[in-house]
């Protein structure tokens, strides 16, 4: 885990997530369980078919709703349209499955992420403050994208 890297700073340190929680949440066993058949889909963006530029994950809530859990583009690959291509592919796949709504949560203070979803047709639903699994309070904003 590179604590000096931008991904760590933007996604772990910024939210005060303890290292032990990160290790447990992103362990191989936890990820395999979370991505089991029928639970979620992982998307990868590769540079020259050998270096991961980013990833995205969707989780299935029910027959009509899918949660866009995350889109992560690594810093050296930002501003190249990778996030938009992830989102376009996710929307295409979910339409083919008959999904009616994609939901996404963004951090209340994550201006860039919020602007990205708003720019791409997601509409604001609500703002909440919740207890995060690692013990702190987290402000989230929920967006929906209606597909049908």
Image (cartoon, rainbow, N blue to C red):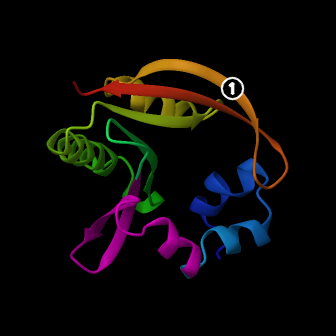
Q: Quadrant of the C terminus?
A: top left
Q: On the rendered structure, is 51 left or right of 133?
A: left
**Above or below 117: residue 70:** below
Classify the position of the N terminus by image quarter: bottom right
> In the image, is residue 55 part of the stretch drawn in magenta?
yes
Q: Position of residue 22 (x, y in %)?
A: 69, 67
Mark 1 nearby-residue class (10 Å; few <14, some 14–19, many ≥20): few
In the shown orientation, is residue 141 left or right of residue 14?
A: left
Please name the residue that numbered disc 1 is placed on.
128
Is 121 placed left or right of 133 in the picture?
left
Residue drawn at (24%, 40%) of the image: 91
The residue drawn where x is 47% and y is 26% is 143
**Residue at disc 1, secondary structure:** strand
Location of residue 122 by image quarter: top left
Q: Residue furthest right?
A: 135
Question: Which stretch did the figure color magenta?
Answer: 29-58
Residue at the spot 24% in from the left edge and 47% down from the top edge? 85
In the foreground, 7 or 60: 60
- Give the x, y percent position of residue 134: 80, 55
Q: Is residue 84 left or right of residue 110?
A: left
Q: Is residue 128 magenta?
A: no
Residue nearest the viewer, comparing 4 with 49: 49
Q: Is residue 134 above or below residue 1?
A: above
Q: Residue at x 69, y 73 (%)?
A: 24
Determine the residue located farthest toward the front in the rendered image: 63
**Residue 117, position as x, y percentages in the image:** 40, 30
């Amino acid at each position: 885990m590179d604590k000096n890297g931008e991904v760590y700073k933007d996604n772990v340190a910024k939210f005060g997530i303890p290292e032990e929680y990160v290790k447990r949440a992103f362990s191989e066993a936890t990820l395999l369980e979370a991505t089991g058949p029928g639970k979620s889909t992982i998307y990868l963006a590769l540079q020259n078919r050998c270096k991961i530029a980013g990833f995205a994950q969707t989780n299935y809530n029910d027959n009509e709703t899918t949660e866009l859990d995350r889109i992560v583009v690594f810093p050296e690959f930002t501003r190249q349209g990778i996030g938009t291509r992830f989102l376009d592919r996710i929307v295409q796949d979910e339409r083919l499955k008959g999904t009616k709504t994609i939901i996404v949560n963004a951090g209340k203070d994550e201006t860039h992420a919020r602007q990205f979803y708003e720019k791409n047709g997601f509409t604001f639903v609500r703002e909440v403050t919740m207890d995060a699994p690692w013990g702190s309070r987290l402000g989230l904003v929920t967006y929906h994208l209606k597909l049908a």
